[in-house]
Image (cartoon, rainbow, N blue to C red):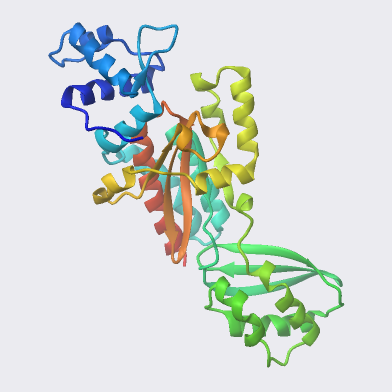
């Protein structure tokens, strides 16, 4: 969507149409702008500016209205070149901090507790569908492993990864093992693998355990299972969602078929996770990089999934050591972009510091 640089009048009118439409969900007419905004322009002049914006594809006219609504191109120009981002207000900052911080202070929480709290408060504050993806684990540092015998042929393996991240897998055994044998193997694994990344362990576990004196059968089973034990969790298992009640309440989704499509998309966790992980493109990130923000905004047909063509996805990464996760807000294209960016940016900083400090 190549755009010429709009002049001041065109920017003002486009900005007003978008800001008004975000609040009212109603098409915006020239008379409304002339009456409510002191632009020093007549109704006729505003009408001419709107006609120019419509000719170039920034706004469109719904069949039943004399007013105009923004197009994907209009929203894109607005987020890239018109909107300005202020800092989040203190009340909302406090609400985020109060909901995330305490979980880790006494070490009783896990990463799941933190991320679940984060996605709930993100949905409540943004009043949109909110999504958190837990970090990818390949670059995560392995701390320790434990094995719990569930029966003589079943075992639960618990991996503790840097910060509060834990991965649990139940293994079916084709051999019978004793508690003593398990303890010996656990000691060797922790001595030889602690401090490595999961990717390093997958590549080198066979060599690192080649000369250990522990039970050979159990050791070989662990080596054979390393691709599963020390691999990424499936993407749908990394997904946390909240705020469905807010998005289905939006005027855009009042028709039954729209709600049905939306709910179907939300329930497909694999597609939802991929949608947020792959959200883009956006030049917003480059325009606003000087503000310290690392935000991607994907509007309408820019989204990878057809079901998301009526949605905007605003997303940002958060960091825990070498690990990278992602936060996202999904809503109608008629969303409060400035507020979504402010909330996400602050939440990402809060989440990064909370999980990093838990180390």
> Quadrant where the N terminus lies?
top left
Residue under the image location 25 percent in, 12 percent down? 33
Left or right, 59 with reference to 44:
right
In the depicted structure, whether residue 112 falls above or below residue 151 = above
In the depicted structure, whether residue 357 falls above or below residue 212 = above
Residue under the image location 60 percent in, 53 percent down? 235
**How many labels were placed on the picture?**
0
Viewer-closest of 120 and 276: 276
Q: Is residue 36 visible?
A: no
Q: Is residue 196 visible?
A: yes
Left or right, 226 with reference to 133:
right
Residue 335 lies in what quarter of the image? top left
Residue 229 lies in what quarter of the image? bottom right
Viewer-closest of 328 and 352: 328
Query: Where does residue 224 sit, x and y in percent of width and height?
Result: 73, 76
Left or right, 181 with reference to 132:
right
Query: Where does residue 12 sit, x and y in percent of width and height?
Result: 21, 23
Residue 209 lies in what quarter of the image? bottom right
In the depicted structure, whether residue 311 falls above or below residue 95 = above
Query: Where does residue 187 sit, x and y in percent of width and height?
Result: 66, 83
């Amino acid at each position: 969507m190549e755009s010429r640089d709009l002049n001041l009048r065109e920017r003002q009118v486009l900005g007003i149409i978008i800001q008004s439409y975000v609040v009212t969900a109603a098409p915006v007419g020239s008379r409304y702008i002339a009456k409510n905004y002191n632009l020093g322009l007549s109704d006729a002049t505003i009408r001419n500016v709107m006609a120019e914006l419509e000719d170039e594809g920034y706004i469109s006219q719904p069949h039943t209205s004399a007013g105009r609504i923004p197009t994907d191109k209009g929203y894109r120009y607005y987020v890239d070149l018109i909107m300005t981002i202020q800092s989040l207000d203190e009340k909302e900052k406090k609400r985020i901090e109060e909901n995330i911080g305490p979980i880790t202070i006494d070490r009783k929480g896990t990463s799941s507790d933190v991320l679940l709290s984060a996605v709930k408060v993100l949905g409540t504050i943004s009043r949109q569908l909110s999504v958190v993806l837990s970090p990818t684990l390949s670059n995560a540092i392995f701390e320790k492993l434990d094995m719990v015998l569930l029966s003589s042929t079943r075992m639960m393996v618990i991996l503790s990864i840097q910060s509060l991240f834990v991965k649990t897998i139940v293994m079916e055994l084709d051999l019978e093992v004793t508690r003593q044998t398990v303890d010996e193997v656990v000691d060797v694994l922790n001595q030889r693998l602690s401090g490595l990344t999961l990717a390093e362990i997958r590549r080198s576990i066979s060599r690192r355990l080649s000369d250990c004196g522990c039970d050979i059968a159990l050791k070989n089973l662990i080596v054979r299972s390393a691709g599963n034990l020390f691999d990424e969790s499936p993407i749908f298992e990394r997904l946390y969602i909240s705020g469905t009640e807010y998005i289905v309440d939006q005027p855009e989704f009042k028709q039954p078929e729209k709600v049905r499509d939306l709910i179907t998309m939300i329930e497909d966790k694999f597609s939802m996770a991929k949608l947020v992980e792959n959200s883009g493109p956006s030049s917003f990130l480059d325009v606003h990089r000087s503000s310290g923000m690392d935000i991607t905004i994907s509007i309408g047909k820019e989204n990878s999934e057809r079901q998301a063509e009526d949605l905007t996805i605003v997303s940002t990464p958060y960091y825990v050591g070498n690990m990278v996760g992602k936060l996202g807000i999904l809503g109608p294209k008629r969303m409060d972009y400035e507020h979504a960016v402010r909330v996400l940016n602050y939440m990402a900083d809060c989440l990064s510091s909370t999980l990093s400090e838990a180390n």
